[in-house]
Amino acid sequence: MNELAGAVAVVTGATRGCGRAIAVELGRQGATVFVTGRTTRDAGSPMKRAETIEDTAELVDAAGGRGIPVRCDFTSVSDVDALRARIESEVDGRLDILVDDVWGGDPFVDFESTYWDSDLDNALLVVRNAVDTHLIALHRLLPLVVRREGGLVIEVTDGDNDDYVGAGVPYYLAKCSVRAIGRALGAELAKVGCTGMTVTPGFLRSESMLELFGVTEENWRDAVSTSAPADFAISETPTLLGRGVAALATDPKVSRFAGQTLASWTLMHEYGLTDVDGSRPDFGRWMAEVRTPGLDPVTTDPTPFR
């Protein structure tokens, strides 16, 4: 459980969701993790959520790593420069793993309107929060990663391919762009002995999703028959992707995945992982065998897919 002892990671967007879970699982392997995001115990963010980077850092500590909370707005170059300065001063500029999980677009996404009837300012904010932030983080932090061979950079997106599923133009552009960044990083970082790639969760049972459907992690299945869509039966906790990223970070042959986008279910099968409850939710198989052929998800037994 200490395969990353001595290693240093930065996780952007680590306040909650997958970012938090990834930070914790890297900490579980002994890493020092710079936990970055906008929400602190003293200051909120437009997300208006209760989770904080200090909470995440404490979870990293409890898992066996070292969590260092650093407030950082990744739309601000000066904020990212200050983060880089902290890394330079506190760990001599060492950065072995960079997980780029910034999002922050939820308040601005319009899933209902046609693009031409939507609010243009909000559409542009979706792209700025999802794409500009990644470019700023990479521009300022990649110089630390490439100082040593073996560095790993992982982009986090939604979906493992570029098929359009009706989520709206700005959201689609944002998530495709992150996959494209991962493909480019796979080629560029290979030139300097490092690895770049992208990962995605399935139907995520995040803090905000549980709240949306009015359930908790303890009784989340109740939502399948009440407030949530039938696909929620194949949902997963953020920890499944967190475990997948930790497995990648400890894999000496991780470079074989350079430029690819790997889903949580793909990582689950590759590394023999389970979710926190011991289940193995395969959202990709559910989509291929239930949704794509047009079967009724309400009457389909989800058990074989977990």
Image (tube, helix red, strand yellow):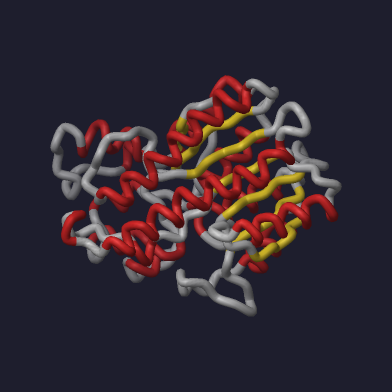
Q: Position of residue 52 (x, y in %)?
A: 60, 69
Where 119 falls versus 31 (above or below)?
below
Q: Quadrant of residue 125?
A: bottom left
Where 5 falls versus 72 (above or below)?
above
x 25%, y 64%: residue:
119
From this viewpoint, is residue 269 visible?
Answer: no
Q: Position of residue 143 (x, y in %)?
A: 71, 39
Which residue occupies the foreground of this view, 27 or 280? 27
Q: Quadrant of residue 80?
A: bottom right
Q: How many marks?
A: 0
Where 294 falls versus 132 (above or below)?
above
The image quadrant where one finds the C terminus is: top left
Q: Position of residue 274 (x, y in %)?
A: 51, 41
From this viewpoint, is residue 290 visible?
Answer: yes
Which residue occupies the foreground of this view, 249 or 90? 90
x 76%, y 50%: residue:
32
Q: Residue furthest bottom?
A: 42
x 61%, y 37%: residue:
153
Query: In the picture provided, is 19 more to the left or to the right than 293?
Result: right
Where 202 falls versus 34 (above or below)?
above
Q: Quadrant of residue 305?
A: top left
The image quadrant where one finds the N terminus is: top right
x 53%, y 41%: residue:
155
Query: In the picture provided, is 90 more to the left or to the right than 4?
Result: right
Query: In the picture provided, is 138 more to the left or to the right than 284?
Result: right
Q: Position of residue 11 (x, y in %)?
A: 62, 51
Which residue occupies the foreground of this view, 46 or 222? 46
